[in-house]
Image (cartoon, grey):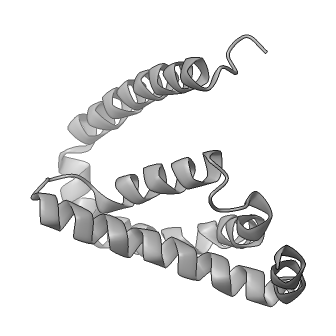
Amino acid sequence: MKNVVRKFFALKFFRVVFGFLILLSLQFISEKLLRLLGLNFPPTILGLIIFALLLNFKIIPMWLMKDICTFSISILPALFVPLLVGVTTYWGLIKLNLLGITGIIIFATFITMVLTAIFVDKMMEWTGKKNV
């Protein structure tokens, strides 16, 4: 059975499409789960946590997701075009609050880096890969 699945996914196109469907499913599940629980939490973050756990416990094989992740990273710059259009549209408003916006960005980046380091450290302790 495993060989049949591998042969089907031998074509890169099918791996990309199936990987995209998995990511969309995880997004949908995380949105529905948060709505069901009544939590105010970003569904994309929960989806990424679920995705990381599924990869870590080898429920989703890494070889299946490699192509969609590579493709997603390759088109990432195109996803910033709407952001840049928004910046140019609202430049007057941004210019008035530039110091505050810059301070918040620096503070949020610092907090994110610290929390990420703590999270990764705890995950490495939990998985036993810290002293390898």
Asked if residue 55 is positioned above or below residue 27 in the image, the reply reads above
Residue at 9% from the left image edge and 58% from the top image edge = 38
Q: Position of residue 12 (x, y in %)?
A: 84, 83
Q: Residue at coordinates 35% horizontally, 75% vertically from top-left? A: 28
Relative height, residue 98 to residue 11 (above, below): above
Quadrant in the picture for the C terminus: top right
- 47 in relation to 86, above or below: above
Query: Residue at image x 73%, y 10%?
Result: 131
Image height check: is 19 above or below 70? below
Nearest the camera: 98 or 33? Answer: 33
Residue 83 in the image, given as x and y percentages of width and height = 41, 68
Dividing the picture into quadrants, the one containing residue 88 is bottom left
Judging depth in this view, the residue of 87 and 113 nearest the camera is 113
Count of picture labels: 0
Residue 15 position in % (x across, y down): 75, 81
User: In which quadrant of the rendered view does residue 43 lie?
Assistant: bottom left
Check the image and name the residue furthest to the front.
1
The residue lying at 40 percent from left, 25 percent from top is 115
Q: Is residue 27 left or right of residue 132?
A: left
**Whole-percent x and y of residue 59?**
62, 58
Comparing 60 with 48, the one in front is 60
Is residue 93 shown left or right of residue 119?
A: left
Side (left or right) of 16 relative to 9: left
**In which quadrant of the rendered image does the N terminus lie?**
bottom right
